[in-house]
Amino acid sequence: MNQSSPGTGTGHGTGPDPTPTPPRRSDATRTAILDAARERFAADGYERATIRAIAKHARIDPSMVMRYYGNKEGLFAAAMAIDLKLPDPGSLHRDEAGRMLVTHFLDMWEENEVLTALLRVGATNQAGAERMRGIFADQLLPLARRVCPDPEQAPVRAALVSSQLLGLALTRYVLRFPPAVALAPQEVVAWLAPTVQRYLTAPHPA
Amino acid sequence: MNQSSPGTGTGHGTGPDPTPTPPRRSDATRTAILDAARERFAADGYERATIRAIAKHARIDPSMVMRYYGNKEGLFAAAMAIDLKLPDPGSLHRDEAGRMLVTHFLDMWEENEVLTALLRVGATNQAGAERMRGIFADQLLPLARRVCPDPEQAPVRAALVSSQLLGLALTRYVLRFPPAVALAPQEVVAWLAPTVQRYLTAPHPA
DNA sequence: CCTGTTGGTCAACGCTTGTTGGCAACATTA
DNA sequence: TAATGTTGCCAACAAGCGTTGACCAACAGG
């Protein structure tokens, strides 16, 4: 359900912990707050997701949110940390990048409400838009740089891909256009994969 | 229900008034309120665009807003009435529908901040999303019905077109991804027109 | 003149918001 | 045991919100 638990968490497999945080007794409360925050931000956006409502959902006192995350912006920043988990750009075939991207994004959006929350907030909140820009610049751009023919065009092509993928997310998960909601995942892939593939690898149309 | 400003019109209307409203002395104030509301809704979204801020921009008292538009929802409804001004579906060639649609939408969005406001509000506000659904159902769907091969597929195809057009608007006018902002209009058309054309007229890919 | 309607300002109401500080219960260590 | 830090709840604060009603200035028709 949640996407990263604080404290002991993630085992010890590869590399040292970037933040060696000792486990705290309040870890359960902390994650409860983050889960509730993601849910409320996704459902209501930044302004209407009140700290009181989030606290009530997490079944704790509103003042705890302040203690653990400082203020509302801090809570938002903590709740919206996200990794798109895009595959290693070196390990994918150039001709299947489109289909793979659409499939992967669809999976991520279906299972994870953080992305919907981020899109909702990004539409009205300065910090949310900034975060969204950062995510796509850091995680989608490198992939485009490896796949598209001329690396200099990578930013434009990544932006075009973003426009189609985020547009789908907008109509399907936020605005909920009935036909967009009703589409089966495989149909979405069948329609959108060629578009994304063209944005990535087709020659510049001008 | 109409969006043209009362009082000093922009001179485009040669037809008869659909709603024969007698001119009032307060018409200037009413349009000032609507203009300020559109500007604030576009910049801040529904919640953060306060009636007080809108009134200050219109240089009148907040209570006037209540007097003329009832409440905040009424003001929003009055400010967001919009006509996409899509051309008569019968008068366009099937092969140029894609290019024509992208060009037309780009023009509308560049000149009109109402659309940006509507998109911002639709992302967080129930009524905004509803309005957005209505607009595209009433204005884009009929066009798709005339252009696409099987009228039964029109809703899906219109939704796909919406996803690409709204996705462009989202990345370019709301999230402001730098590469999406930097694209020249003709480049946008060159990239997106084939996509929209395919969504409208290509055979079902599954 | 008086009277009624319209356009507009002012001050305030009730409510919700983010945020704060105090206080009790518990855990840990000395 | 006492001392200390952590976890949590409670009550309250100042500020801002949408909204309301009293009040004043101008005009119109008799």
Image: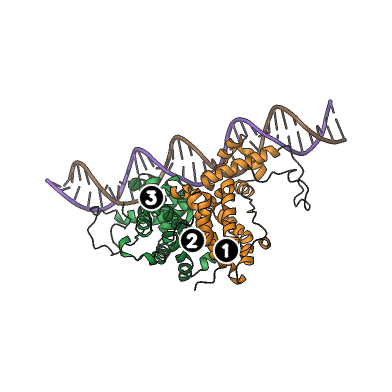
Chain colours: A orange, B green, C brown, D purple
Q: Estimate the x, y position of residue A112 in percent, counting from the top left.
A: 59, 47
Q: Residues within 10 Å of mark 3 (few under 14, many from 20)?
A: few
Residue furthest bottom as drawn? A206
Is residue D2 positioned above or below A1 on the image? above
Q: Which mark is residue B134?
A: 3
The residue type indicated by label 1 comes to: Ala
Left or right placement of residue C27 versus residue D10 in this view: right
Residue B169 visible to the viewer: yes
Q: Estimate the x, y position of residue B194 in percent, counting from the top left.
A: 46, 66
Q: Which residue is mark 2?
A: B168
Q: Could you give the CA–CA distance between mark 2 and mark 1, rounded to whole angstroms? A: 12 Å
The residue type indicated by label 3 comes to: Gly
Q: Could you give the CA–CA distance between mark 1 and mark 3, rounded to whole angstroms? A: 31 Å
| Location of residue B3 (image quadrant) | bottom left
Q: Estimate the x, y position of residue A166 in percent, counting from the top left.
A: 53, 56
- Give whichever of B169, B73 is nearer the camera: B169
| Location of residue A147 (image quadrant) | bottom right
Q: Which chain letter matches label 3?
A: B
